Amino acid sequence: MSKLWGGRFTKETNKLVEVFTASINFDQKLAFEDIEGSLAHVQMLSECNIIPKNDAETIKNGLLTIKQKIENGEVQFSVENEDIHMNIEKLLIDEIGPVGGKLHTGRSRNDQVATDMHLYLRNQTLNIIELVKGVQTALLQQAEEHVHTILPGYTHLQRAQPVSFAHHLLAYFWMFERDKDRLQDSLKRINWSPLGSGALAGTTFPINRSKTAELLGFDKVYPNSMDAVSDRDFIVEFLSISSLLMTHISRLSEELVIWSSQEFQFIELDDSFCTGSSIMPQKKNPDVPELLRAKTGRVYGNLVGLLTVLKGLPLAYNKDMQEDKEGMFDTVETLDGSLRLLAPMIETMTVNADKMYAAVAQDYSNATDIADYLVTKGLPFRQAHEVIGKTVLYAIEQKKFLLALTMDEYKQFHELFEEDIYDVLQPKNVVEARNSEGGTSSEQVKLQIIVAKQSLQ
């Protein structure tokens, strides 16, 4: 039989089955991780005297030759050889002869593929952490420039209270900080070695799993061989963290779309991150943040897809698990592309501070400060709240903003109003008054920036 595992079979694999079950079209992304794992495995086999040292050296050189050929684009992977593991083993045997068949001593494709994915996801998680830092750096740079820039803060997408634009941006900084922490923490579970667990029960050969773990930079080995080959928790965790990270990217993207609209005009995105219309020449469309919103859905789908694959599987390995890779690869690529675009888009956006301030000056978002003003003069908050509610209603009916009301108009709602109310209601003073820890005053925002910088170091 042509298959490396074909000794027990009397018929060739049906070609439709061959194509349907093959994973080489996508798992070839694991080629270098597969070779890295094999190099560690063959070194361990040699040191444990399981295969002769000269055979191990021949295998090592053969693997390095294949790696070089892959890098040079000289390798064509074959569906007939099913997956990246069989493809590389076949290439190795073709390169160095039957001695290449000794490489698979003491291991199975089950622990081999698990090892490859641990290696791959470790590398990609570290890369994504750095990309998240890049987005945080862009947010921090804009925040430092706009500590004193004031815009309306919203709840329910209704104007609530004036805030520092820096404070608003830093809210996203801390969302991404938690994402980064979750990714960092997940490395503790990604960095376990399944290599040497065999198909499910270990191996009869006197292998040294700690040695291969050391060679591959893993922190520990799985204590249970069945768990080692069937565990995909670390991928589910990565997809879960990625889903939350994409949620934060999507929320920020939504604000960029809204802020850059003609109705808001709070920001303008750089031309290099926008596109035009095929029929309306005046259009400047925020396609990048719109796509970032949309791509969030595919990451969610990848998480739900893998959870669904795993939910009914008995121990240990099942062919269903072949479906664990495409969603993982797709999520990695989606995050990588999204984060690489988001950082420079934030760095290059123009902030229209005057438009933001004009919006704050023409609303009732300073109403809470009137209530606080009356409280400081001795009125219970609930009574103050009622007074201000009536004051705002009156102002709306008179088509006036609160700063435009006369003292006589204020006095008709409560005698505690004095001339100093006009200072209290200035947008700058409204922002600066919120000097509690974590608040939006310039003092608190500057302190927040210091802490944010420290977190990036």
Image (cartoon, rainbow, N blue to C red):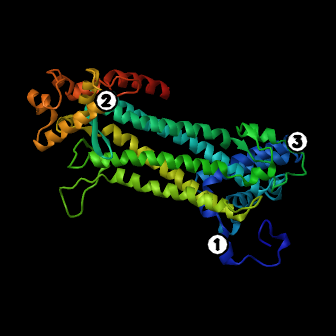
Q: Secondary structure at mark 3?
A: loop
Where is 312 relative to 429, above or below? below
Q: Residue at x 53, y 50 (%)?
A: 332
Question: Marks 1 and 2: in contact by CB < 8 Å?
Answer: no
Circle 3 is placed at which residue position? 48
Q: Residue at x 74, y 49 (%)?
A: 38
Quadrant assignment, res 280: bottom left
The residue closer to the viewer here, 79 or 159, is 159
Q: Residue at x 59, y 51 (%)?
A: 71
Instruction: Tell which tag, 3 or 1, sits nearer the viewer.
Output: 1
Left or right: residue 176 versus residue 381 is right
The residue closer to the viewer here, 388 or 128, is 388
Q: Residue at x 57, y 43 (%)?
A: 125
Instruction: Tell which tag, 3 or 2, sits nearer the viewer.
Output: 2
Q: Secondary structure at mark 2?
A: helix
Circle 2 is placed at which residue position? 381
Q: How many residues crowd around disc 1 within 10 Å: few (fewer than 14), some, or many (20 or more)? A: some
Give x and y (percent) for residue 45: 84, 45
Q: How many residues crowd around disc 2 within 10 Å: few (fewer than 14), some, or many (20 or more)? A: some
Instruction: Tell which tag, 2 or 1, sits nearer the viewer.
Output: 2
Amino acid found under the numbered disc labelled 3: Cys
Q: Earlier in the sequence, mark 3 or mark 1?
A: 1
Give x and y (percent) for residue 159: 26, 41
Give x and y (percent) for residue 282: 18, 55
Left or right: residue 233 versus residue 102 is left
Amino acid found under the numbered disc labelled 1: Val
Circle 1 is placed at which residue position? 19
